[in-house]
Image (spheres, rainbow, N blue to C red):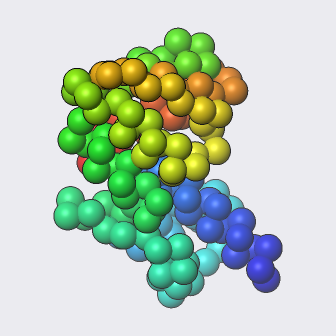
Amino acid sequence: MVKRRNSRQDAIREIVRGKSIKTQHALVEELEAEGFACTQATVSRDIADMGLRKLPEGVYVLAEDLHMQRMVSELVQHVNCADNLVLVKAQPGTAPGIAAAIDAADLSEVVGTIAGNDTVLVVTDSAEKAHVFASLINNLRNA
């Protein structure tokens, strides 16, 4: 039982980070598409257990990602991938804070960050994970 809940919550974490989820029903549908049979009541409990928050735009976000989301949506100007590296361009003087927020979010695809004045270099362990991370940042920019 605990193993299924942990797996489901890991899936919720990935879904919320990868897509704009606005309702519990939409989250149930996404989980079902990934092979999890669950009810809206189960998802509601998971949302409470995981500390998911709803942004003013109506999109669910993980509590640990909230700070990063605010930083990214307000300060990031451009994101570019090159192999396993992601270059995040931001407003002058904000890169160290953005890098700290990315590090604090403890994203599985991120190996580490290096920040300059207006640029954050994010290192992942594969080109595929770099694209996943870049998509996440772009989703947060547009949320």
Looking at the picture, does residue 21 appear above or below residue 120?
below
Q: Position of residue 10 (x, y in %)?
A: 64, 61
In-front residue for pair 138/123: 123
Residue 69 as seen in the image, left or right of residue 45:
left
Q: Position of residue 69 (x, y in %)?
A: 34, 49
Name which residue lies at 20% across and 59% down: 57
Q: Quadrant of the N terminus?
A: bottom right
In-front residue for pair 37/124: 124
Looking at the picture, does residue 64 appear above or below residue 73?
below
Q: Position of residue 15 (x, y in %)?
A: 52, 55
Q: Is residue 135 visible?
A: no
Residue 21 as seen in the image, left or right of residue 6:
left
Name which residue lies at 31% across and 40% down: 72
Residue 105 as seen in the image, left or right of residue 139:
right
Name which residue lies at 58% across and 46% down: 107
Q: Position of residue 5 (x, y in %)?
A: 70, 75
